[in-house]
Image (spheres, grey):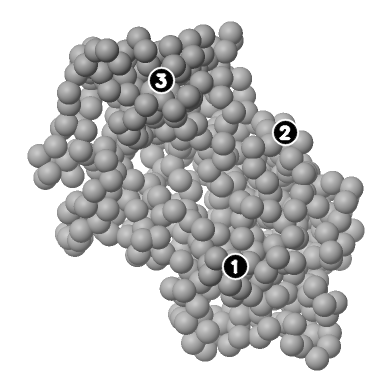
Amino acid sequence: MLINANELAGDTEFTAEICIIGAGAAGITLALRLGAAGRDVLLVESGGFGMLSESGAIGPDPDTQALYRGTMSGIDTWSLDRERWRLFGGSTLQWSGFCTPLTPEDFATREWIPHSGWPLDFGALSPYYARAQTVLGLPPFEYDPRSVAERESKPLLEGTGRLATHLYHFSAPIRFRDAYRGPILDSGSITLLTHANVTEIVLSEANDRVSHLRCETLEGTEISVEADRFVLAVGGIENARLLLASNRQQPEGVANSSGCVGKFFMEHPHYYAGAVWLETGRWDRSFYRRHEAQLIGPDGTTEMGEIEGLLALSRTTREEEGLPHVLITATGPSFLDGSETGVLGADTVWSLICEGDMTGYPLILRAEQTPLAESRVTLSDSVDALGVPRTDLRWAIRDSDLQGYSRTVEILGAELAAMGLGRVHVSRDERGRVDLRPLPGAHHMGTTRMSTDPATGVVNGDGRTHDAVNLYVSGSSVFPTSGAANPTLTIVALAERLADHLLE
């Protein structure tokens, strides 16, 4: 059932067994699973189904999207209101479809990664990754590059053993707005409430559970929502913002006895064409280009899918060197196009190599950011159209991470040299850090982190907040560490796992 909050005659109260706040990838996945089991679900969405832009593309309503506006007091290579879309289907409407799971070591405590360690392991999430493949319109769950490469009779870059290969699967990409609008509206158990903006999470008198939600439309209609259980699924920044802004009863905000809400914000720093592989030897790179491949799932299901090999350092190498995870793809071949190359300018570098038999492949680095408490979401003094404090985001990256990214490229270059395949260059400053401004991947993580100990996180391994027994959080904000994998596949897998927990 669909209810447009803008069409309500006056202030209204809703009740449900389970209320999900946010109709993005996590919220829709949860709603569909719970609705299919006959649970009474209210799915609350700030936007509608979008509107046509001048170019003919679907996008969010500008007034609703403006609720995302905020300030960047740290690294400011992006804007808060452009990275996420506020409408049914969320940011899957601008998603590129890159999918790869976190690795088993990403879940483990790593001595060289501060605040690392999840309260669950890869095995606990593995069956839900297989489900997530289906939700995202992907082929069977097979991410072992060696098996796929052997079937294709294609070589892998291994060097002296310090390199590893990972795989991307590519979704079409699926747009949740189009793929799941019908199933949501046709469900007899799901009520979708659009244009309803949650402005406050209200606790019971004992402050140990959520009593109800206060919502409001941009036209001023007020809505109250009561439920047995609530799931917050509005993104890595907005999850923290809403918890912090709900501070009438507790000055620190809801579910924030640890003080961790908003802290440990992580992105995947992206560096485009700042590093280059100068290839002197010829080698079959086809496995590391986007291509169709036969994929075989754990149950033997076979299907064709689009994949691409990714270069990385082996787990052993990262452990020995104390490095974060970096995934590397090579584009081109092409010239450097004026990209900064450190002491020598791009034109000079190219003049030195172009006379020989050498090809340049600009590299894309997609890097893990290690948790840093000073990288955080806070509330500013300004408010949005509904009176909710706007976000100030201080995105910060450790110097050791920046040095680690440079070291990763250095090791890759040494391995390529050992194979007679050339050298790799990356611009570095006088302290050995990547000398490039990091660009975002629109991957917002860590601000309501999972933890076993309530003093060091916001939610437990099931996604339930430590402080409020009927409040859950879903999405990448619960990631304790980011790994280097694009988060959408893991977001959906965690939503599938949370659905099972709620059904129990």
Closest to the observer: 109 or 79?
79
Residue 171 is left or right of residue 225, and the answer is left
Q: Secondary structure at mark 3?
A: helix
The mark tally for this picture is: 3
Q: CA distance from mark 3 to mark 1?
A: 42 Å
From the image, tell me which residue sits under label 3: 409
Residue 401 visible in the displayed image: yes
Give neighbour class at mark 2: few <14, some 14-19, many 20+ (Cα, 10 Å).
some
Q: Residue placed at 19% from the left, 51% from the top? A: 293
Residue 416 visible in the displayed image: no
Q: Residue placed at 52% from the left, 89% from the top? A: 188
Q: Residue placed at 27% from the left, 53% from the top? A: 306
Three-letter amino acid code at the position of disc 2: Gly
**Rendering coords of residue 35 (x, y %):** 50, 79
Where 420 sits versus 499, above or below? above
Residue 438 is left or right of residue 135, and the answer is right
Q: CA distance from mark 2 to mark 1?
A: 33 Å
From the image, tell me which residue sits under label 1: 54
Three-letter amino acid code at the position of disc 3: Val
Q: Are marks 2 and 1 in contact (CB under 8 Å)?
A: no
Residue 401 is left or right of residue 283, and the answer is right
Give neighbour class at mark 1: few <14, some 14-19, many 20+ (Cα, 10 Å).
few
Q: Are marks 3 and 1 in contact (CB under 8 Å)?
A: no
Q: Secondary structure at mark 1?
A: loop
